[in-house]
Amino acid sequence: MTDTMIIGADSEVILHFDLKLEDGSAADSTRVNNKPAKMVMGDGSLTANFEACLLGLKKGDKKAFTLNANDAFGEPNPNNVYYMEKSRFGSDLKIEEGMILAFSQPDGSEIPGIIRSVAGDSVTVDFNHPLAGQTVIFDVEIIDVNPGNSQQGEK
């Protein structure tokens, strides 16, 4: 029965995580609000490389993984940097370097973009993940593991 507590391909996992940069600075953490994350392996919440770190862990495990940029958020892609006319932004919005804004996609979903520069009527927007190009430390504490649907039978 203990094998059901080991994280497998479709396990439901409740975990705390800290995502840190190599210099130790925090990038993200569930501990800030003391609210653990809940996810199902393979549901797209985490990339395949982050999920691979969790496979085989069990309730109570604490472990840190160092992922290079290619295994974490990838390298920055220059094709994800766009130059837009300042007029495309609302006149009431004070656009500043470093701001993160949500941009609507054709399918209605939204994607965050970082304002890299504002020069005259041109705004440079970077749609790369903010942690692209960074080696990250993925520090996890497994709170609970439940078997996935394939282990419990189909719904």
Image (tube, helix red, strand yellow):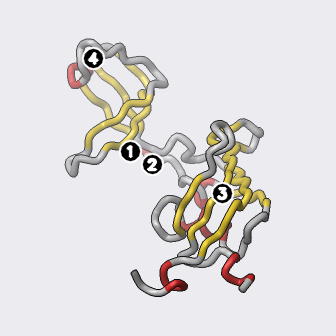
Mark 2 highlights which residue?
77
Q: Amino acid at mark 3?
A: Leu
Mark 4 and mark 3 in contact (Cβ < 8 Å)? Answer: no
User: Alpha carbon of mark 1 to alpha carbon of mark 3: how far?
Assistant: 32 Å
Please tell me which of labels 2 and 4 falls first in the chain: 2
Q: Amino acid at mark 4?
A: Asp
For the residues carrying marks 3 and 4, which lies nearer the camera in this image?
3
> Residue 29's spot in the image, x, y percent?
65, 43
Mark 3 and mark 2 in contact (Cβ < 8 Å)? Answer: no
Q: Amino acid at mark 1?
A: Asn
Mark 4 highlights which residue?
121
- Residue 140 vertical placement versus 113 (above, below): below
Give the structural element (helix, strand or loop) at label 2: loop
Quarter of the image where the N terminus is located: bottom right
Tell me: 116 left or right of 6. left
User: Alpha carbon of mark 3 to alpha carbon of mark 4: how far?
Assistant: 45 Å
User: Alpha carbon of mark 2 to alpha carbon of mark 1: how far?
Assistant: 6 Å
Q: Nearer the viewer, residue 151 or 81?
A: 151
Number of other residues with Cα within 10 Å of mark 2, as a class: few under 14, some 14 to 19, many 20 or more: few
For the residues carrying marks 1 and 3, which lies nearer the camera in this image?
3
Mark 1 highlights which residue?
80
Q: Amino acid at mark 2?
A: Asn
Please tell me which of labels 1 and 3 falls first in the chain: 3
Tag on residue 15? 3
Which quarter of the picture shows residue 81?
top left
Tell me: 72 left or right of 2. left
User: Alpha carbon of mark 1 to alpha carbon of mark 4: how far?
Assistant: 20 Å
Mark 1 and mark 2 in contact (Cβ < 8 Å)? Answer: yes
Mark 4 and mark 2 in contact (Cβ < 8 Å)? Answer: no
> Residue 37's spot in the image, x, y percent?
59, 53
Tag on residue 89? none
